[in-house]
Amino acid sequence: DQQVKQNSPSLSVQEGRISILNCDYTNSMFDYFLWYKKYPAEGPTFLISISSIKDKNEDGRFTVFLNKSAKHLSLHIVPSQPGDSAVYFCAARFSSGSARQLTFGSGTQLTVLP
Amino acid sequence: DVKVTQSSRYLVKRTGEKVFLECVQDMDHENMFWYRQDPGLGLRLIYFSYDVKMKEKGDIPEGYSVSREKKERFSLILESASTNQTSMYLCASKGPGNEKLFFGSGTQLSVL
């Protein structure tokens, strides 16, 4: 059973609008979360992270929100740009864990339409 | 920037062949990882290594082995390739005290 779920395999958004990518987790022991972005023919690259002591972390156009009670996190991209078109993976781990213990979601393909 | 290089972008092998996937990183990282990526399943950890000659099984180690004879190089070995090992294989490395994984560009392996 997948402990980290990205229920939307794909999302299309118009350029300039907001993209919202969602991620749900089932293990309440997870308390550190990361987002990775993957372009075709490239490996995933780290995008943004959030610890459970926060409910929001912002980096430029990218903001991650964490709702611990709902076991839900979301990545907001504002404004969306065509270059943001990629597969986005969320990942989770325990705070005392190492990267070995990262659990990844299945990914969401974001397409930003010009 | 960290560079993680996987030797092959595409590989086509026959069932039963022994397959070697090579990965090299240039940042002196202790930790190296092998994942496979399958549609609908995300990235799943096959093996990881935390030092030369040290390895640990990940979530799906069956049918795979690894070798880490030098710090910069981490090899994934399919002893006898099977069709269910057709997948995208991603190598990653991580330095101490750093949460970020640095990934290679992946090897798409097809086993016929």
Image (tube, coloured by chain):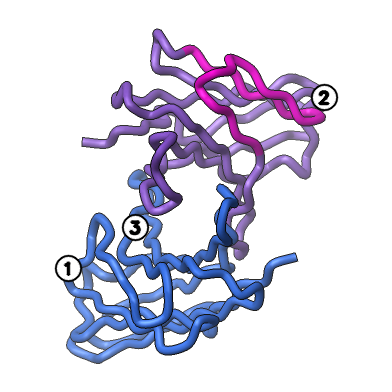
Chain colours: A purple, B blue
Q: Nearer the viewer, mark 1 or mark 2?
A: 1
With respect to residue B46, does A22 lie above or below?
A: above
Q: Locate residue B22, reporting x and y percent.
A: 46, 84
* Residue A111 found in image quarter: top right
Which residue is label 2 attached to?
A: A16
Q: Residue at x 55, y 22 (%)?
A: A74
**Which amino acid type is marked by label 3?**
Leu
**Which amino acid type is marked by label 2?**
Gly
Looking at the rendering, the stretch of residues picked out in magenta corresponds to A48-67
Q: Nearer the viewer, mark 2 or mark 3?
A: 3
Return the chain for callout 1. Answer: B
Name the side, left or right, on which B41 lies relative to A75. left
* Residue A12 found in image quarter: top right
Name the side, left or right, on which A56 lies relative to B60. right
What secondary structure prevails in the magenta region?
Answer: strand
Which residue is label 1 attached to?
A: B62
Q: Locate residue A4, reporting x and y percent.
A: 36, 33
C-alpha separation, residue under disc 1 versus residue under disc 2: 46 Å
Q: Which residue is drawn at 32% across and 87% down?
A: B19
**Tag 1, which secondary structure?**
loop
**Which amino acid type is marked by label 1?**
Glu
The numbered disc on residue A40 is none
Which residue is label 3 attached to?
A: B45
Asked if labels 3 and 2 touch by Cβ distance under 8 angstroms, the answer is no
Q: Is residue A55 one of those drawn in magenta?
A: yes
Task: Give the class, few, some or many, for how many residues have Cα within 10 Å of label 1's Cα (few <14, many ≥20).
Answer: few
Return the chain for callout 2. Answer: A
C-alpha separation, residue under disc 2 versus residue under disc 3: 36 Å
Q: Which one is nearer the viewer's eye here, A61 or A15? A: A61
